């Protein structure tokens, strides 16, 4: 959807449960559930659908393969990764796959990319399984973005970096979107984050954040804008998205109970505790979305912490979307 076609209010997206179907189905997940939910989201007027990423730490359907299926089953809704662990992959293969999905979707793909964590044993094993030294993941990602943008331009790419060496490489075709697939970088608040701000300002088309509160989100946007100005880029060229995890239930206690249980199953622990949410009352979800929009979010992406994803989407369409249309 182009800016001229946008409905009034912020863009609102949902996360498709590519991990949820694996948790529910084990070795035989119902992958068609992802496609059906994307169709329902498009019919409901949701602006975008997104999928997460993990190789072995949090098993799920492969994100770009899933989005290829969604692309051919929908016609309007934008599709994206939130977020893709790009450094697990080779840049030429990723550029080729992303260009293919963008062609299949007729220009609806966004790649939100993150460095990824290496804090737990399962995360560390994920990088080792992919044959990637986890200490190099940030540098690999930075080089990958430069390489992919070059390949998407259609010109031959020669690149000699610390992590990748390419000589006169072309894909032979380009993404539907020009100059290429938009890239958002995961950018958060906190000590020692200055490299994230500079990286986003230099390499990205915008940011995606799970920063705790609206003031911190506004601070992240401000820091990225300052870095952009310092290198001669206009902050207006950088979009911003906020990623939130909610459970919709008129019974607040029941919503909170399910939300905590779902997050615990998803991560293996109640990762971040009460910083997820809100759980329960849809009015609380509306209020939180409004606060982040006021803090500068162009798009809010909602993940449902629930075992009944279609019901969550139904409640989202009935109780949340109308507040922004």
Image (cartoon, rainbow, N blue to C red):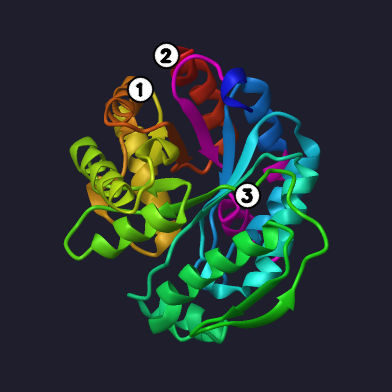
Please report the bounds of the magenta region as a residue range. Answer: 6-35
At horizontal 24% and vertical 42% (from top left) the residue drawn is 222
Label 1 with label 2: CB-CB less than 8 Å: yes
Q: Is residue 49 left or right of residue 201?
A: right
Q: Is residue 124 magenta?
A: no
x, y (%) of residue 150?
Answer: 63, 63
65 in relation to 89, above or below: above
Tag 3 secondary structure: loop
Q: Is residue 21 magenta?
A: yes
Tag 2 secondary structure: helix
Label 3 with label 2: CB-CB less than 8 Å: no
* Residue 259 occupies quadrant: top left
**Of the numbered discs in the image, which one, if any, rests on residue 286?**
1
x, y (%) of residue 108?
Answer: 67, 39
Q: CA distance from mark 3 to mark 1?
A: 30 Å
Provide the residue designation for mark 2. Answer: 323
Tag 1 secondary structure: helix
Label 3 with label 1: CB-CB less than 8 Å: no
* Residue 234 occupies quadrant: top left
Question: How would you rate the neighbour count of disc 1 (Cα within 10 Å): few for under 14, some for 14-19, many for 20 or more?
Answer: some
Q: Is residue 312 left or right of residue 149?
A: left
Question: How would you rate the neighbour count of disc 3 (Cα within 10 Å): few for under 14, some for 14-19, many for 20 or more?
Answer: many
**Which one is earlier in the sequence, the residue at label 3 or at label 2?**
3
Residue 30 appears in the rendering:
no
Residue 71 appears in the rendering:
yes
Where does the N terminus fall, quadrant-wise? top right
Provide the residue designation for mark 3. Answer: 181
The foreground one among 101 and 27 is: 101
x, y (%) of residue 253?
Answer: 29, 33
**Which one is earlier in the sequence, the residue at label 1 or at label 2?**
1
């Amino acid at each position: 959807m182009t800016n001229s076609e946008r409905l009034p209010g912020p863009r609102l997206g949902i996360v498709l449960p590519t991990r949820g179907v694996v948790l529910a189905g084990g070795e035989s997940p119902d992958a068609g559930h992802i496609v059906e939910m994307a169709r329902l989201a498009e019919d409901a007027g949701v602006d975008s659908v997104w999928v997460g990423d993990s190789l072995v730490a949090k098993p799920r359907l492969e994100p770009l393969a899933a989005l290829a299926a969604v692309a051919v089953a929908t016609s309007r809704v934008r599709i994206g990764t939130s977020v893709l662990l790009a450094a697990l992959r080779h840049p030429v293969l990723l550029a080729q796959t992303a260009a293919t999905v963008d062609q299949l979707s007729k220009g609806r793909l966004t790649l939100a990319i993150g460095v990824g964590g290496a804090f737990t044993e399962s995360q560390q094993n994920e990088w080792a399984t992919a044959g990637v030294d986890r200490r190099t993941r940030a540098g690999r990602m930075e080089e990958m973005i430069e390489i992919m943008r070059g390949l998407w331009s259609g010109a031959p790419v020669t690149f000699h970096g610390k992590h990748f060496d390419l000589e006169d490489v072309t894909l032979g075709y380009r993404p539907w979107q020009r100059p290429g697939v938009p890239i958002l970088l995961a950018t958060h608040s906190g000590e020692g984050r200055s490299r994230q701000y500079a990286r986003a300002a230099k390499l990205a088309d915008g940011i995606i954040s799970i920063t705790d509160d609206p003031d911190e989100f506004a601070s992240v946007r401000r820091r990225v804008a300052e870095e952009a100005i310092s290198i001669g880029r206009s902050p207006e060229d950088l979009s911003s998205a906020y990623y939130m995890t909610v459970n919709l239930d008129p019974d607040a206690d029941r919503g909170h109970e399910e939300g905590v249980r779902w997050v615990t199953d998803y991560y293996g622990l109640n990762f971040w505790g009460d910083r997820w949410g809100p759980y329960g009352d849809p009015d609380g979800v509306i209020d939180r979305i409004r606060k982040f929009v006021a803090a500068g979010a162009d798009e809010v992406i909602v993940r449902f912490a629930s075992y009944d994803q279609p019901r969550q989407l139904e409640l989202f369409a009935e109780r949340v979307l109308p507040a922004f249309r």
